[in-house]
Image (cartoon, rainbow, N blue to C red):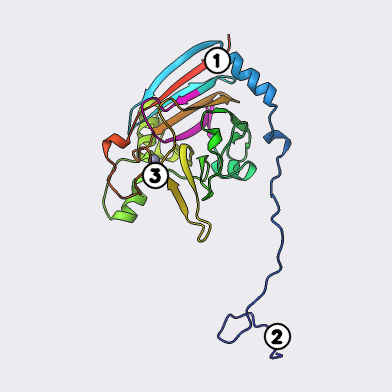
Amino acid sequence: MSESRPSPWCGRGDKPREFAKHQPIICYDKPAAAVVSKDEYDDKRYQALTGELVETLVVPKREARTWTMQTGDLCRITVHEGAQVGDVNLWNLENRQERFYSGKTRQLHAAHLQVYDRLWSCLPYLRPMATFVFDTLAKYGIDEDGGALHDVIGTRCDDYTYKLITGQERVGSCHSSLVKAVAEERGMTEQDVHDVWNIFMCTGFTKDTQQYFCKPSPAQKGDFIEFIADMNLLVALSACPQGDVSMPVGAAVPDEKCHPLKVEVFRRK
Ligand SMILES: [Zn+2]
């Protein structure tokens, strides 16, 4: 082997390997099914909001609840008492094998969803389950650290990771709350709970080390989001025991940092 030829091994004295520079390529550049007609969805929103209020429920702080929606129904989730983040799961009401796929939703849209983005189902279905239609926090945008709201980065807080960090046993996470709600209200199991849509939560990845970070939720009393069901849905929502997420995972979360979330479902007449 010639001495000048770079070694595949990164041993002492080797020349540093150089890589060709390329511009980023957007991998999934807005397939037609991921781009909705804003007029169509604004009209669906108007029809639903001027129709009937068919469901109102409150998800108590540190708990989870479930509800159903018909195709075309609009769901509004409101931070009606104080800053609070929520973790959402979705299933096809008639086939619970078809459920929300946060990873592919992230690739088709972005790590943080914006109004008119859609929530997609798992393989082999890969269909829009719902479309995000309104957000009172839309102006937050992407902050100076790359933080933004409503991520589909994935997972949900859980007691297994809590034990990994603290060494302590605990039952009190979005995962355990969602498991309890789907078991008690729908006869489902822990295996049915999946990666979530993290509403009202401000998250990102640090620019230097690409580590996951969060910031306290900027949501205030009265803020809300809305989405429209693109199929008949079973929905579960956890009012996260991390509350407004102003404490790191592992630290005790004071009760005053946790709030309930209000759910309303509207249906066109
Ligand atoms: Zn949580």
144 or 251, which is in the foreground? 144
Residues tagged 1 and 2 counted as in contact (Cβ below 8 A): no
Please name which of the two marks, 1 or 3, marks the residue nearer to the observer: 1
* Residue 5: assigned label: 2
In the rendered structure, the answer to whether residue 238 lies left or right of residue 207 reads: left
Where is ligand 1, by quadrant?
A: top left
In the rendered structure, the answer to whether residue 123 lies left or right of residue 215 reads: right
Q: Which residue is disc 3 drawn over?
A: 157
Residue 156, image x, y percentages: 43, 43
170 or 180, which is in the foreground? 170
The answer to which quarter of the image holds residue 245 is: top left
> Element at badge 3?
loop
Residue density around tag 2, few if under 14, some if 14–19, many if 20 or more, within 10 Å: few
How far is mark 1 from mark 2, CA to CA?
A: 69 Å
Q: Residue visible at 60% across and 16% down?
A: 46
Quarter of the C terminus within the rendering = top right
Q: Is mark 3 within 8 Å of ligand 1?
A: yes
Lower position in the chain sequence, tag 1 or tag 3: 1
Q: Which residue is disc 1 drawn over?
A: 49
Magenta segment range? 76-97
Q: Is residue 171 magenta?
A: no
Q: Residue visible at 36% across and 26% down?
A: 81
